[in-house]
Image (spheres, rainbow, N blue to C red):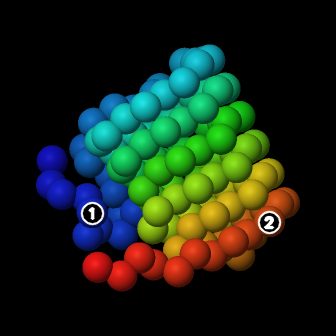
Amino acid sequence: MFETKDTDIVDLEDDDFDTILADDIKFKGNIKFTKPFMIRGTVTGKISATNDLVVDSGAVVTADISASRVLVKGRVEGNIVAERIVRVSSSGCVVGDVTSEQVVLEPGSKFSGRCTMTIPQSN
């Protein structure tokens, strides 16, 4: 697995993820992770991360999310706070507030909530 920090989140492939929650899994509770994580199933609870999260097409997440970078191809109901970027693809839907340095809503995506773009921390 290569370092994903400098790779565009939309270019990540299955091999780049340490864990993939399969589409037949329904999880309820809190998830914490430090390596790239992909959700293809259903998650209800809270997600806290220091790395990348991808909510894949067909996935349904009902949770507040905190991560470095977030790509939504499925559905998220809850607030998203990302350190670097939140990207909602054309198949994605977010119902909740989004806070990040960058927010990208692709044509065709669905979004209902407030968007707050933060100023990057200078070193």
Q: Residue 83: horizontal and vertical position, in percent? A: 47, 62
As displayed, is residue 24 above or below residue 41?
above
Report which residue position mark 1 lands on. 5
Residue at (62%, 17%) from the top-left corner?
28
Task: Determine whether, in the image, residue 60 is placed left or right of residue 17.
Answer: right
* Residue 37 found in image quarter: top left
Mark 1: amino acid: Lys
- Local packing at callout 2 (Cα closer than 10 Å; few below 14, some 14-19, many 20+) is few
Task: Determine whether, in the image, residue 58 is placed left or right of residue 4.
Answer: right
Badge 2 marks a residue whose secondary structure is: loop
In this rendered view, identify the residue nearer to me: 110 or 114: 114
Residue 76: mark in rendering = none
State which tag comes first along the sequence, 1 or 2. 1
Residue at (31%, 40%) from the top-left corner?
34
Badge 1 marks a residue whose secondary structure is: loop
Report which residue position mark 2 lands on. 114
Mark 2: amino acid: Arg
